[in-house]
Image (cartoon, rainbow, N blue to C red):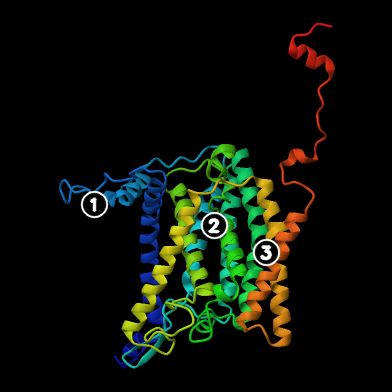
Amino acid sequence: MKEILEFLQTQLVFSTVLAVVVVVAILGTVAYAIYFERKISAWIQDRSGPNRVGFFGLFWNFHFWGLGQPMADGAKFLLKEDIIPDHVEKPLFVIAPTISLIMAMIGFAVIPWGGQVDILGKIYDVQVANPDIGLLYLLGIGSMGIYGVVLGGWASNNKYSMLGGMRSAAQMISYEIPMGIAILVVVLTCGHLRLEEIVTSQLGTGTPWMIVRHPLAAFIFVVTLFAETNRTPFDLGESEQELVGGFHTEYSSMKFAMYFLGEYAHMITGSAVFAVLFLGGWDVVPFITIPGFAFEDTAIWAMLLKMAVMACKIFAFLFFFMWVRWTLPRLRYDQLMRLAWKGLIPMALGLLLVVVVGLYFGLHDKLWFTLVGNAIVFAGSMLAAASSSKPITGRQDNMAPIEPSRKSTDSALGVSG
């Protein structure tokens, strides 16, 4: 009996319970994130959005603003016919959506949700896992998500699906480079790869959030996060106007829903990572320490407050995701690649150079130095873009101009020879 009680008080049991709670919370958030995306798009477009589906007659004549819509959508996906075309590579076709969903779901394991908590005299990390290389784990898991997209496009044996998968792969490779450099800027500034250490380095007086120290790195990370999650204006892998639906053209029923759920789960994990890296994690406001939010505050009520702050930051960034989708148009593919290779990567490398110089001279933790360095890199990037003599046009820029002959012009004007 004593051994059982000791086992129940281990970090393993606490992490297992926390994993179950977080997975349930993420799945519930994913379902209602789709609902809120529809409501936000309706608000932006001056419509009502879903407002009819209640809770299946449990409360007669009350629709509760359509809050039953996610359950109706889930039932629809479960009951729809699951069509697998004859021309697909069936094993890969079936497993591809599963890869995307699993890779999107397991990234949350290293997120520090609330520092530490004291329960009956035992101190627990409010984290499912606490490895020394938490950031590398996140980068690795995020990179593997593209396998589900590429395999789905290739296994569909459809030219539109194949093009969508190849577009997504090229986009992922391109935008992971500036994302990795932006994360490296944070790591060099904080001196840690452990996510909870990155949070604690942003707590307290005189240690502002990383978005204050390196606003340009935060901007680069946000742009690349949109590309990593295939969200507008970077959803070139789907691009309905060109590719019908892209990599998921041949999918239906729950396999299509798994791609859909994986996208929103990736958004939630990405929002949590941004909050940890640049918004101080569970901290409420920068520059000052509020009682209950320090790493040393291990009471249960302090843990709940910290988790509530993290949830608020995640929901705020999810709103930003949805707001941008219904505000900005989709980029053209050559513009997408140009932005990464000629814009974000040189900018990120310049920012990395600033941090390395700061480390050499011991100035990397000085706010004035990081802000001046960010301003110099940004100004240099804008000057380089403005001084470029080549206009930003489409692929027709490389084609010779077509000059109509006199005969064809006269024929068009109705003039006889």
Residue 379 screen position, x and y as percent:
70, 65
**SS of the residue under disc 3:** helix
Label number found at residue 64: 1
Residue name at image x 66 percent, y 46 percent: 333
Label 1: how many Cα within 10 Å (few below 14, some 14–19, many 20+) = few
Q: Which residue is mark 2?
A: 229
**SS of the residue under disc 1:** helix
User: What distance separates the C-alpha of mark 3 from that of mark 1?
Assistant: 45 Å
Residue 146 screen position, x and y as percent:
59, 57
> In the rendered structure, are the residues bearing label 2 and label 1 in contact, judged by CB atoms less than 8 Å apart?
no
The residue under label 2 is which amino acid type?
Answer: Thr
Residue 298 screen position, x and y as percent:
37, 88
* Relative to 259, 20 lies left or right: left
The residue under label 3 is which amino acid type?
Answer: Ile
* Relative to 134, 60 lies left or right: left
User: What distance separates the C-alpha of mark 2 from that of mark 1?
Assistant: 31 Å
Label 2: how many Cα within 10 Å (few below 14, some 14–19, many 20+) = many
Mark 2 or 1, closer to the camera: 1
Residue 386 screen position, x and y as percent:
73, 55
The residue under label 1 is which amino acid type?
Answer: Phe
Closer to the camera, 230 or 143?
A: 230
Closer to the camera, 348 or 179?
A: 348
Tag 1 or tag 2, which sits nearer the N-term?
1
Q: Quadrant of residue 80?
A: top left
Quadrant, the N terminus: bottom left
User: What distance separates the C-alpha of mark 2 from that of mark 3?
Assistant: 15 Å
Residue name at image x 39 percent, y 69 percent: 311
**Res 42 visible:** yes
Label 3: how many Cα within 10 Å (few below 14, some 14–19, many 20+) = some
Residue name at image x 46 percent, y 77 percent: 112
Q: Does 297 sit above or below residue 344?
A: below
Q: Which residue is mark 3?
A: 177
